[in-house]
Image: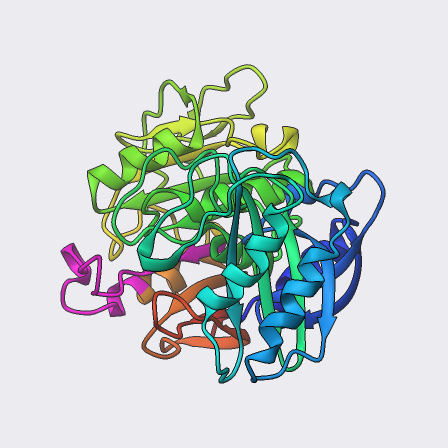
Amino acid sequence: MRGIEPLVAMEIRRSHTGVVRGVRHREVWFEARPEADLLGLRTADDVLLAAAVVDGIGPARSALLRLARAAREVDPRLMGAPGSGVEVSASFVGRRNYTRFEIEDAVGAELARPLRVPYHSRRDGRRPPAGARSWRVTIEDDQAVIAVRVAARPLHRRAYKTASVRGTLHPPVAAAMAQLARLGGTGTVVDPCCGAGTTLIEARALAGGGADPAGMRFLGFDHDPAAVKAATLNAGPATPGLPAALDSPESPRLPAAPGLPAATGLPGASGTQAAGGAGAGAARVPVAWAMADGGRIPVGDGCADRVLVNPPWGRQVPPAGLLSRGLAPLWREVRRVLAPDGLAVALVHDGIPRGFAVEEVVEVSLSGQHPLIAVLRPR
């Protein structure tokens, strides 16, 4: 995702996945460490093995011949199993005298030749069949890389995301928000506009992979019952019994399930223990979901250490309830529930909300827009 390349590089370093060698437009180049969990990266949309780096790729059409020659010389050991053929996706930065489809066809035909399998072109909106080996070509300045996908599908297609709602957040962006939240040593993490639960599920995965999960709890709220249902399904098996709202530090406690610490209950909510692929640490962190208006968060004053929020943009998801006339009630509530040393990490589209000091800002490209991931501290 454009804008979070430095956060991807940071995750690679912190997780000891590899040594970062460079950052380009929507790319982080790194050398993987032995036995590294390449598929455990959460801020990256995908992980690919660089099979060829080609210099001298200018805007003239002769670059297509150079790319085809480089594809012809790719080490056959990197080809993998033949599968049902080869498919290629290409992109470039700047103006060129050729199209992405011409790049794909020039490279794909040569990659498929030694395997004696068909090359599946994407021209005219055609979609490659399942099982085709996925390759990627990217060009920036005069340098191209030809790379092959490590996994069977892109990393951003999370296995846990079996249910969705309109406006659901892109998982790597949610993971980037969680990374910026500095979850280590925190207690209660709240998302007042949880949607399908993506942000808290990614945050819990990050907490289980690095921070000490003991004593942490995640609370997600949404005005839409379909969103709460989707979040519950995505987060995993439900834990029974959530009798009371979190309206004060003395709220009743959720009875602990085996391996699950006690957590504060929420009305009409579902609690969950495990997120798909989140790791053993995340499975020990309780999470609960409930219906609530973003303008009236059922959390006591100063009880939240972190708030992660992607407010309704008004495009795919219109603001509802107390937010139908504007987001001011949401930001008042966020300031109220945050602890004095708490942080809010928000995806904002209309500027920084009033009443907050800005600690960090990351601009991203998302759905044709350029919102900010803002790390905010209440004034």
In depth, the one of 27 and 330 nearer the eye is: 27
Instruction: Give the residue at x 29% y 54%.
Output: 167
Secondary structure mostly taken by the magenta-highlighted segment of the chain = loop
Pick out the residue farthest to the top.
Answer: 258
In depth, the one of 16 and 19 nearer the eye is: 19
In depth, the one of 89 and 227 nearer the eye is: 89
* Image height of 129 relative to 339, above or below: above
* Image height of 70 relative to 281, above or below: below
Q: Magenta span covers which residues?
A: 306-330
Image x and y of residue 271, in percent: 40, 28
Can residue 2 be seen here? no
**131 to the left or right of 282:** left
Can residue 306 be seen here? yes
Instruction: Give the residue at x 34% y 42%.
Output: 196
Instruction: Give the residue at x 57% y 40%.
Output: 205
* Image height of 32 relative to 240, above or below: below
Q: How is the image coloured?
A: rainbow
- Is 5 a magenta residue? no
Image x and y of residue 233, in percent: 36, 29
Q: Residue 138 falls in which quadrant of the image? A: bottom right
Image x and y of residue 330, in percent: 29, 62
Instruction: Give the residue at x 48% y 82%.
Output: 97
Q: How many marks?
A: 0
**225 to the left or right of 350:** left
In depth, the one of 300 and 100 nearer the eye is: 100
**21 to the left or right of 171:** right
**311 to the left or right of 275:** left
Image x and y of residue 83, in percent: 56, 33
